[in-house]
Image: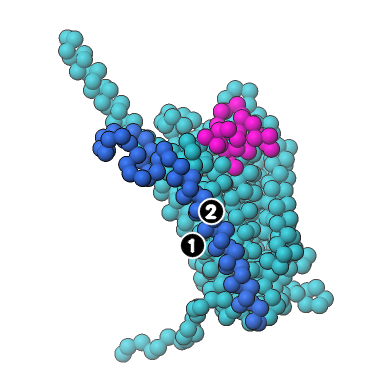
Amino acid sequence: MGFPYDEANWAVVDGAMYMGHGSIMPGVYTLIAAVICVAVLFIGHKSEAEKSAKH
Amino acid sequence: MEEQLAELTAQVAALKGGGATTNTMFAEMFYYLTIPLMIIIHAGFLAYEMGSSRMKNVLSSGVKNILAFAFMIPTFYFFGWWVYWGFPTGLTLSAGEAGISGAAYASSIAFGWGESAQYMGPNIADNASGVFFGAFALFAATTASIMSGAVIERIQTVGFVILAIVLGSFAWVVAAAWGWHADGWLVTKFGVHDFGAAGLVHAVAGFFALGVLINLGPRIGKFNADGSANHIAGHNMPLTVVGLMLIIVGFWGFLMACVIVPGEAWSWFGDKFATIYGTPITLSALSFNILMAVAGGIIGAWIWTKDPFWMMSGALAGIISTASGLDIYFPALAFVIAFSAGIIVAPAAAWLERRGIDDAVGAVTVHGTIGLYGVVMLGVFASGYPALQGEGVATISLFGQIVGAVVFFLCGFVPGYVVSYILKGMGMLRVPEGAEIAGMDTVKIPAQGYPEGIPTSPAPAE
């Protein structure tokens, strides 16, 4: 991914400085994070339902 | 002479630059510090509801509360922040007069992808977006925590987390967009003033909890066959009372975060603090009124109950009942209103219990009922005050505050009832009876809250 500015020098940085700035990667990371949240809720519910069913 | 003038001009420019830098750093630090202070609110709610749980449920109550916080932050990042900026003018999502609202504006600053991502991540030219987001995300976490205590000891974890997301990243955010934004239609059309979020945070969360409680039902053993209620004591009253005090500590950060600092491009003024509506405020006003409200609420509750739980709940009720007008109340008036809130809080909770609602910590009353009471009280005492900065703006009125109270009630109750009803239909709301009787720690927590019990202390050294 690399440094998001043409020159690898902090002196040229005048705005966003996160990894992936200017590319589609922030959107990809956001999507992955959202999918993780949904998947954890799904798996968590399944696990908890199995434990509760034993009582 | 010309050289001296040029030198002087350069010095003035350097001073201005230095002053601007200091102001920007102050503004960023101001909001940054509200975030850990508001995390203390969450710590308080954690202690409060763990203490209010019986020993067999103490850790599961804690897990639920911690998860609410953990899911609130990313979901508020994904879409809650967008809702705040997108919804102020109503469901049309159109732009308002202040130019900082509507779907197009929200999409340009509040999404974690595309061009707007520059405002949702590290940016050397943006010292404001992250700290504003953080403060609002903690408001969201507060709403989830308010609901969390009411539903302890019988709700499913994931069902609760889904409800917390709906409340914290959508329901209260819509109320905030409408009543806590310069373009909010409740503000521009009805002059609604709710500086410290008595209605749009507390009442929304409290009545969301009521909607959930109706579908969730009471804990086993709470009510007898004739409808009379039994008191289900928590396992640790001191923990609960300390938790309530922590919530009050955190409220100072909460209310600090309701203030707009001066001197920045996004500020209302160059030289003084403002409310979110652009009306002037000082931190001294907050100091006077919060302290008097805390005192009034405690004293009012003590008269009626003599119970430390209700005394500290009275302190919360005192702040919440005056929160709408902490910027303009006279301190003695804040004391009187808080005192009255302290008096009514325990009887109001008992009234709700007699209607078959098992609110384990009194959240519906303390936050919901008292929140609306506070919104309406401001209409009684502050009618005629301009609700916004500028010429010809709407003024605060009793009618406007009542309209606001009704809207805040609906923003909480309707989604709380509807989503919990759907979850109930899907079997995701309540734990099975056997699990509830056994205790939820035994069922799903791989740890013990008190592995050695709570033994008597050993004898002191000679």
Which residue position holds label 2? A34
Labels 2, 1: front one = 2
Residue ID at (56%, 42%): B82
Query: How far apart in space, not on screen, are marks 2 and 1 (Cα)?
Result: 26 Å
Where residue B10 appears, as percent x and y from the top left, is 23, 20
Which quadrant of the view contains residue B399?
Answer: top right
Question: In front here: B119 or B359?
Answer: B119
Magenta segment, prevailing SS (helix, strand or loop) = loop
Q: Which chain is blue?
A: A
- Say which mark, if any, is on residue A8: none
The N terminus of chain B sits in image quarter: top left
Q: Which residues are magenta?
A: B83-108
Please rate how many residues cluster around mark 1, counting C-alpha atoms within 10 Å: few if below 14, some from 14 to 19, many from 20.
some
Farthest top residue in view: B1
Q: Tell me if I can see residue B291 in this picture.
A: no
Chain B tint as drawn: cyan
Q: Amino acid at mark 2?
A: Ala
Helix, strand, or loop for circle 2?
Answer: helix
